[in-house]
Image (cartoon, grey):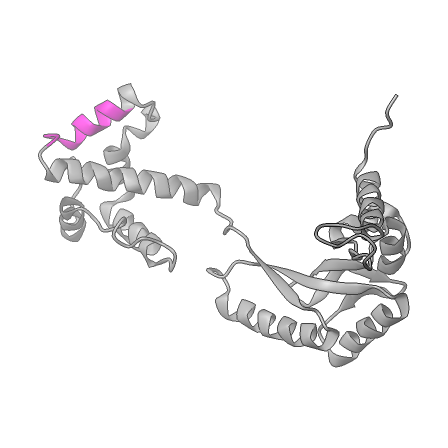
Amino acid sequence: MQAKLSRRTFVKDVAVAAVAAGTSSIGSVRAGAAAARIPCGCRDGHLSLAGKPDAWANMKALGAECIESVVEMNMVCPNLTYAGGKHTLDTEDNVRRLKDDLAASGCRITAFAMGNRFDERLEAELEWARKLVKAADRLGVDAIRIDVWPRKLSQDEIVDRCIHALINEGARVLDDGIAQRASDIDVVYLTGYGFPLYRGGPMLYADSVGLFNVLRRMREFAANPHADPAFWQPAARLAQLAAEGKTFNG
């Protein structure tokens, strides 16, 4: 019966396979020529699988010689552990400590990884990137991988975006004469699209929160640097009614 493959054994098996490949002729290497050696590496998230007391011992247990390391915004490398804690890159002394540890262990960092939300904290993240580039240069790290994480949206914002887009489209339907009354649109959404009955329909809901507030919220969405402002351009009737303090059903 074949043994169950765990993540730890998978990483180790890949390491063994890579080392074996590096001792034989590969690719276009001619027979008898010096064999090309493939350094085996892993991401730092795998290190805990080995169960050793520090990052370098974990790397050796996994058969890895090099690693890609995550660096958090406070310049902490959360998975590069040693007896005194976690390596950080926030000061020259700490960078030097990591460099000395790498030299003593024979291990190497080939890339740093950072997760970014540029639309939320642009200036802070640019400063973070500058510091990381400087530390990478000191440590001989050749690459920085930037993962752009999607902005976290609350449940309320998701609902607001959907409903306000629907309200605005309903106002355009009225502008174009496709529907005669706002209540006609509400009836369609209540009976045909499962809009919550207790809300009365998108247009009545807009009246209940105030068209001025609907317009203000749409402008907030349009102001997002990654938004499409044209999408959130208010329909003429919505803008007029909001300016006059009126409602769709008034």
Would residue 121 be seen by someone viewing this image from the given angle? yes
- How far across and down, in percent of the image, does residue 132 sit? 64, 71
Foreground pick, 157 / 122: 122
Q: Nearer the viewer, residue 56 or 181?
A: 56
Residue 186 lies left or right of residue 89; in this view the side is: left
**Stretch in magenta:** 178-189
- Residue appearing at x 22%, y 23% in the figure: 187
Q: Residue at x 91, y 55 (%)?
A: 53
- The residue furthest front is 31
Question: Which quadrant, please, contains the C terminus?
Answer: top left
Q: Position of residue 233 (x, y in %)?
A: 23, 51
Q: Position of residue 95 (x, y in %)?
A: 76, 75
**The quarter of the displayed image where residue 223 is located:** bottom left
Is residue 17 within the magenta segment? no
Please identify the quarter of the rendering in which residue 169 is found. top left
Q: As drawn, is 20 to the left or to the right of 248? A: right
Left or right: 54 as drawn, with respect to 7: right
Q: Nearer the viewer, residue 91 or 202?
A: 91
